[in-house]
Image: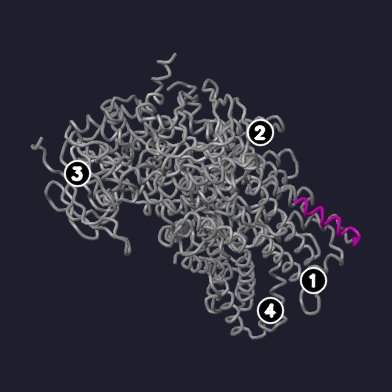
Amino acid sequence: MEKSIKWKDRFARLNVPIIFWGLLLLVVILGFVSPNSVKPAHLLDFTRQAAPMILVAIGQTIVMMIGGLDLSVAAVMVLIDVVAAQMMMNDPSRAVPVALLCLCIGMVVGLVNGFLCAVMHMPSFVVTLGMSTLLLGVTLLYSGGSPKGSIPDNFRFLGTGFAGKIPMAAIVWLVIAAVVILVMRFLPIGRYIMATGVNPMAVYQSGVDPVRIQLTCYVLCGLFAALAGLQISAYIGTASLQLGEDYQTRSIAVALLGGAAFTGGKGSIFGTILASLFMVVMSSLIAVLNMDAGDQNIIQGVIILVGLLLSGMKKDD
Amino acid sequence: MNLRAFIKRHDNLFIVYAILLAVAVVGAVSSPRFLTGINLGNIMEQAVGLGIVALGQVLTILLAGIDLSVGAVVSMSTAIMSLELSGGAAGILLNILLTLAAGALVGVFNGFGIVRLRIPPFIMTLSTMCIVNGVALKIRPVPGGSIPYEFMDLLFGRIGIFPHAVLLWAVAGALLVWLLGSRRLGRNLYAVGGNPTTAALSGIPVGRVRMQAHILCSVLAAVGGICVAARMGSGDATLGETYSMDSVTVCVLGGVSLFGGQGNIVGLLASTFILTGISNILNMVGVSSYYQYVFKGLILLVTVLVFSIKDKQKG
Amino acid sequence: MDLRQTVLEAKDICKSFYDNLVLDHVNFSCTSGEIHTLVGENGAGKSTLMRIFSGVYQPTSGELYLNGKPVKFTGTLQAQQAGVSIIHQEFNLVPHMSIAENIFLGRQLRKKGGNLDFPAMRRRTEELSRMMRMELEPDAPVCSLTVAQQQMVEIMKAIELDTQIIIMDEPTAALTPVEVSSLFAAMRRLRDEGRTIIYISHRLNEVFDISDRITVLKDGVMAATLRTEETTKDEVVSLMVGRKLDNIFPPRDEAAGEVRLQAEGLVIAPGKGPASFSVRAGEILGVTGLEGQGQRELLRALFGLHRLAAGKIFIDGQEVRIRSTREAMAHGVTFLTDDRKNEGLCLDLPIYRNISLPVFRRLKTGPFLTVQAERQETQRYMELMNIKAESSAKLVRKLSGGNQQKVLLGKCLSPAPKVLLVHEPTRGIDVAAKIEIYTLLKKLAREEQVAVVMVSSDLMEVLNVSDRILVVYGGGISGELAAADATEESVMRLATGVAKEAAV
């Protein structure tokens, strides 16, 4: 077997995703443009802002690992935000049961997506697009178009609070991400997910039902979308119908930047986290540059494109 | 050909037209005003923009691709159309030319990324969407501007119950039927979507076909945008947002396979009217318009479920 | 005979990929109006040579002459225009387009003004299909055709291109005997028109049936070109393999334990079969038959991959239900598929991940599974099977066919099976790897007392590796032979159903 490896090789074998260098570059540019923005407090704030994106993109990455796609995550996030605000009604004692209910809603949505995609073999793009439209309708009907209610402070602590200097939101995603990375690395399910993405039939011939694995992935994606929705609720404290929009396609862009591919069998939770942070720092940079909405959109499009080209180039080597 | 074989070969079309019929019956039963000439004209008026955009979208989907930037092109088109470039109604001609040129440019950009840089269409057109949305916002940061009344009348005046723009839609549709059915480009499009390797080995210029499809798609989106602008009478950089996903929905409902190479545009007529019909009916009955999303989502899911069960039975 | 002119000639063709010399000064020529077969072990360079003829690859050195003139093909299109077309094993057809459109793909006939001339294309397609003695509806989509019909469409496409030389790469692999004979009839007609067919096949019976001349390639070198009537199968085989058969197959010995697996009245589809048989521990049961007679389904049913209409399966005397791969593996059954790329392996995962895939549960410490545990497990199999790779972390895609097959076998062995089902265990791999796999199967049976069921269409393999041979016909067992008594003829009589009917 392999002998001990020099630290230099070890560093090379860590295989630092290219998005890491992109993130570093953005932070450096930000430092030049606005030295204030790279003070520790600000940098820590990035980890707070990135929380919903990280959570939802982890789910998206998991679904993309099996070659699927989930366009309904944004709709789930909005629905969860509205449900949480309207049902918690600023009552601290309701926080926990309502949050659990929200997670269940996310998983049920994921289960339906998974059933249609994995069991009925429908294309995930259409299924989750239909689900997205459906959920939007449900959310609007449930809230009557103008959602009410608010989130009690004990729950808001998860979005706005601090433990020492560290934002609670960062701790939430760090803990969840650590669990997911460990599961992907050290539990059989992680291996099964990757193998299913590469070749479901080979998994079946190893005595494991790939449909069950695929279902699990969609349920997890729904769960993570719900977590992201709750995280947003905790941060803004009210219900809003607009917040989720950005996440529908952007979570897919983040997963791709982090190393996933539409063909499945690829993807890295760590890369996805870095890509989420990349997106947040990019928005912040754009904000600092005092650009109007038009320029912001243009720059974002260009940066996604460039990032993708760069990470794609690395894959070809 | 006997009738049964004919139905079997085109069963997707029969399903979508059956749904349209059902929607029409529900409409007629639930409101006496539904089948009036004025209302049918209104539905057509609403459907034209989406219908034309979907005609473009179908080209990219036949290639097993997708174009998420059509919505942004619609937005940008309304923005360009609402600029007052030169006085008089004839000045609008300049706006139209600019809009079409901008659309073509977007198509070239998409095509370049997909063909040359080999970026998957989904993510390429997603980036384009961001960029084009940005351009639209630069042109028209807040909704406003105006479209000459004469031009609005030109497109949306009516002959009988038909808005003039329906003619534009019909011409675009007919051109596309001809293009897809009896021109080399059209047949090559199906071949590339069905099996790109084979197409390349048979000497079909795969890259050029993709490029042409994307240019045509974006130009049609711009034409759709011109119609939307003429109906609204002003420019709005967020007006087009829903058109990307809606046009994909129209294609899928119309029986076009997302895996490429299968389907035709005959079904799009029905699926466009299904989508616009639903909101019209809800509006009429006075039920919350929010139900339209629920119905849209359900119809999409159920129809595709039926398609997939049917395909499974076939083989 | 000698009036025929040489149409395609290859002189001193060499082709290397990186440092790997795949073709070494190959000389080859074929004349008009002949069917010229190219045989050789996998990896002998047949497909590389064909790809050079059809313009996919350019030779590293050497010249190609077409009708006496030197040519350089830079692409398949150019080769086609010059008159060489190739029909691959995987068809190049667009499934949802009509036959006529597939034939004229990329070269559609047009009317004045550029509109496509569908009536003309339809007429020409009808003409072509009459020429091939087929009844094909020009408007039918290609995906509605049988494999044999699709093959005909490919041939019609080549004729429409008016190519002088048609290369066919194992065209009979998926055809029934009836379809093979009608394909051969079509090929003979094309030959009699003066066209040249270069035919690649592994099936020596067919090769001797159809060819005018046979060229044998071995390890990238042209071993010989022989006239079919002047040679024998034995000569061709020894030229291909370069060694005597005795050195390929393990020596015969006898051993058999208790009945391990028993199948009673298996019906693979209503109206077929039934089939009953048993395998003993330590025994290798060879199962063969003509393509499509149900041996594939019987084997897959034992692993839960095919739903049986009826039948009972016993393992160690206990009746078991096998409706999924999971249940099969729970009863100690593992399966080696004949389609390693699509069904067997995760090509984009490392070796260790493939071999450990079925045994994650066993390799866990507590709930955790470490890479170390996977790699340790894999190391055993890499040594046992002599898998050549610098590390177990190498992606399976980057291995040679033989090594991939060994990884797949390792995946079947890691769960320590009681019953091992293997389907075409040595398809598409070189002789050295074949020998290793045969030795390993024998060792597993004799030393580990595994019951091995081997379905194979390679008669040499079936005759020389099995202890007992079953022949399948119409989903049932048409006969059982002790390996020592079996001959190619006795197996073929059973396989074609002749012997059975005679017995009745």
According to the picture, the residue beneath numbered tag 4 turns out to be A43
**Residue B42 in view of the camera:** no
Q: Position of residue B264 (x, y in %)?
A: 47, 38
Q: Give the amino acid type for the residue marked by disc 1 in the picture.
A: Thr
The answer to whether residue B128 of the structure is visible from this angle is yes
Q: Which dot marks residue C320? A: 2
**The magenta segment:** A91-105
Please tell me how crowded label 4 is: few (under 14), some (14-19), or many (20+) other residues with Cα within 10 Å. Answer: some
Quarter placement of the N terminus of chain B: top left
Three-letter amino acid code at the position of disc 4: Leu
Q: State the separation of the CA atoms marked 2 and 1.
A: 59 Å
Q: Chain of mark 1?
A: A
Q: Earlier in the sequence, mark 4 or mark 1?
A: 4
Q: Work out whether A25 lies above or below B92.
A: below
Number of the label disc, if any, that sits on residue C225: 3
Disc 2 crowd rating (10 Å Cα; few below 14, some 14-19, many 20+) is: some
Mark 1 element type? helix
Q: Secondary structure at mark 4?
A: helix
Is disc 1 in contact with disc 3, using a CB cutoff of under 8 Å? no
The answer to whether marks 2 and 1 sit on the same chain is no
Q: Chain of mark 3?
A: C
Q: Are marks 4 and 2 in contact (CB under 8 Å)?
A: no
Name the chain letter of the residue that bears numbered label 2. Answer: C
Q: Position of residue A114 (x, y in %)?
A: 66, 46
Q: Residue at x 40, y 20 (%)?
A: C499
* Secondary element at tag 2: strand
Label 3: element kind:
strand
